[in-house]
Amino acid sequence: MSLVFAGVCSHAPGITGRKDMAEGDDAETLYAAMDEMRLAMEATRPDALIVIAAEHFANFFMNNMPAYCVGMGEEYEGPIEDPEWLGIQRTTVPGNVDLSRRLIEHTMQDIDVAYAEEWKFDHGIMVPLHFLTPRYDLPIIPVNINCQGPPITPLHRAYAFGQALRKACDAVPERIAIVGTGGISHWPATPDSGKIDADWDRDFLDRWCSNDRERLLDYTDEQTYFEAGQGGFEIRTFIAISGATEGCTGSVPYYRPIPIFAVGCTVGIMDLDSAPPMEGAA
Amino acid sequence: MSLYYVQKLLYNLNRDEELQQKFFADKDSVLVDYKLNEEEQEALRKPDIGLLYILGVNGQILMHYAAMCGYAWPEYIKSMRDALDEHGNVRAGLYVTTDGKGAV
């Protein structure tokens, strides 16, 4: 089989942990959009969900930092944070060792990836799962791209990683959903928390929706840092989804800057039927 | 500066509840295992969350230590803003590449 669903969403801990501090209908509309994303994913009947995340020093530290890592555990624990702080109770999330191993082996044909049989999920994965698999009954394949501790992987490699992951998905019989999760512009956990450049975000999302590789990769890290904060490095997760869905176009059903959540909250869906027919296809 | 080891300690605390219990029962019993200078040890002991930010601790690590020490979110943000006024810009790490103040 191959991909049956692909999308992107935000994962900021404030989304669940500071829900009660949100103003107006910010939380209500975001939660509704995430629920719509869940319904759209469930309708595709996936056997497993790959979450491409940008974890925040929960498992990986500067003593041994992989650029890319794929989980290969029977199960995972999360959240690593205080459940009260995050607003998500601690639980066990199922994995799929056999599927992970096959995906990793195929991906390694093109990209060197690390693997991990232990993985404590932080908010970067738990917040999306809280909405997308609230019963924690779908096997998860966690994937991490180091977006926190420079030096970090170049954008063109994140795109190539997505392409490699797509080839791996095409090579297994399971129905695979894939979601990239990160912030766009944001300055998380700093004195500037709550600052969001909505214009920068919308321009990036325009590039993401059109899946314009050249424009998606047309950022330097220095530019991203100064214009979109250190959280902007997480665009790598979105760009990996672009690589995995090359040729497709997408839409953004929800985008709203929500300062108390410290990010422009986003739900994006890639239309997997929008790819032009392959050359030579009937 | 031994920013690496300050962050390593906080990374380990975030992952290990037993280490948290040991640390909060007797901080020096844990601090001794890390190569830290006096300013760093004192900032961790106090705790001085704002000074840890100024020393360069990544917010993604620091915010959990602040929560562990009982800081509500607005207090955590305020501690960093106050520290910028008191100590000046961030001295090391990821944030030093800007003016250390961003939008503030």
Image (cartoon, coloured by chain):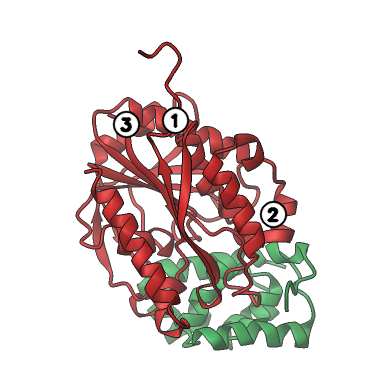
Residue A2 is marked as 3
C-alpha distance separating marks 1 and 2:
29 Å
* Residue placed under numbered mark 1 in the picture: A275
- Which chain is represented by red in the image? A
Q: Position of residue A244 (x, y in %)?
A: 45, 35
Q: What element does badge 2 sit on?
A: helix
User: For this rendering, which residue is in front, A274 or A257?
Assistant: A274
Amino acid at the residue labelled 1: Ala
At 76% from the left and 88% from the top, the residue drawn is B86
Q: On what subunit does the disc labeled 2 rest?
A: A
C-alpha distance separating marks 3 and 1:
14 Å
Do the residues indicated by labels 3 and 1 lie within the same chain of the protein?
yes
Who comes first in sequence, dot 1 or dot 2? 2
Amino acid at the residue labelled 3: Ser
Residue A48 is marked as none
At 58% from the left and 56% from the top, the residue drawn is A148
Who comes first in sequence, dot 3 or dot 1? 3
Q: Characterize the local packing of mark 2: few (<14), some (14-19) or many (20 or more) Cα atoms within 10 angstroms.
A: some
Q: On what subunit does the disc labeled 1 rest?
A: A
* Residue placed under numbered mark 2 in the picture: A224
Residue at the limit of the structure toward the top, as seen here: A280
Colour for chain B in the figure? green
Q: Position of residue A247 (x, y in %)?
A: 49, 31
Q: On what subunit does the disc labeled 3 rest?
A: A
- Depth check, mark 3 against mark 1: the one in front is 1
Q: Position of residue B95 (x, y in %)?
A: 71, 66
Q: Characterize the local packing of mark 3: few (<14), some (14-19) or many (20 or more) Cα atoms within 10 angstroms.
A: some
